[in-house]
Amino acid sequence: MNALVRQTLAGLRVLLVLTAITGVLYPAAVWGVSRLPGLHANAEAVDTTLVAVPREGDRWFVPRPSAATLPASGGSNKGERNTDYDAVVAERRTEVARREGVTEDRVPQDAVTASASGLDPLISTAYADLQVPRVARANGLGEDRVRELVAEHAEGRWSGAPDVNVTALNRAIDTEG
């Protein structure tokens, strides 16, 4: 009986310690970090280009599709062999091809597949180039100028492949138009 009491008390101590750490200390630390200067401004969201901000209409570049439901982020967990996922990708490919006025075989993979978080602001230069004619036409800009803006907002990624930050690019389009 003495061993059972000792084990029970040890279990209760561990429960209390972990409750204090995960239920009080960790949330307090996260709250404290969120209050550091530069992370917020008068309780309003800070302007960032780290998150894809989709916009409606032909005037702007379209980011990758998102499986997330804002304000949460997350992927769909559907793999390439999932028939539902295949149907969604095929539907997206048809939609992008129609919107951009190209055949479906010209639609890049990142135009039809969601990023892991669903909030990634980066698209391939191929997807950005596909959208240039539509964006130029809708904004009354020359395609050469829009291509220059795309090049200005291309950045290297850990994979080494250049990508374009859609949020920053759309802000640049706003200043041009």
Image: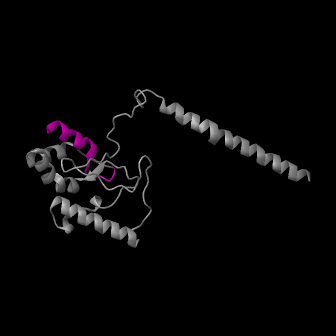
The colour style of the image is one colour
Query: Does 115 sit left or right of 97 as displayed?
Result: right
Q: Quadrant of residue 47?
A: top left
Q: Residue at x 53, y 36 (%)?
A: 30
Q: Residue furthest front?
A: 57
Q: Position of residue 133 (x, y in %)?
A: 12, 53
Residue 164 shows up from this direction: yes
Asked if residue 175 lies in the magenta stretch, the reply is: yes
Query: Does 79 sit left or right of 95 as displayed?
Result: right
Q: What span is in magenta?
A: 158-177
Query: Does 21 sit left or right of 129 as displayed?
Result: right
Q: Residue at x 41, y 71 (%)?
A: 82
Q: Position of residue 29 (x, y in %)?
A: 56, 34
Q: Position of residue 67 (x, y in %)?
A: 39, 57
Q: Residue at x 44, y 54 (%)?
A: 74
Along the viewing direction, whichever of 7 and 60 lies nearer the viewer: 60
Q: Where 98 sits versus 49, above or below? A: below
Q: Residue at x 43, y 46 (%)?
A: 71
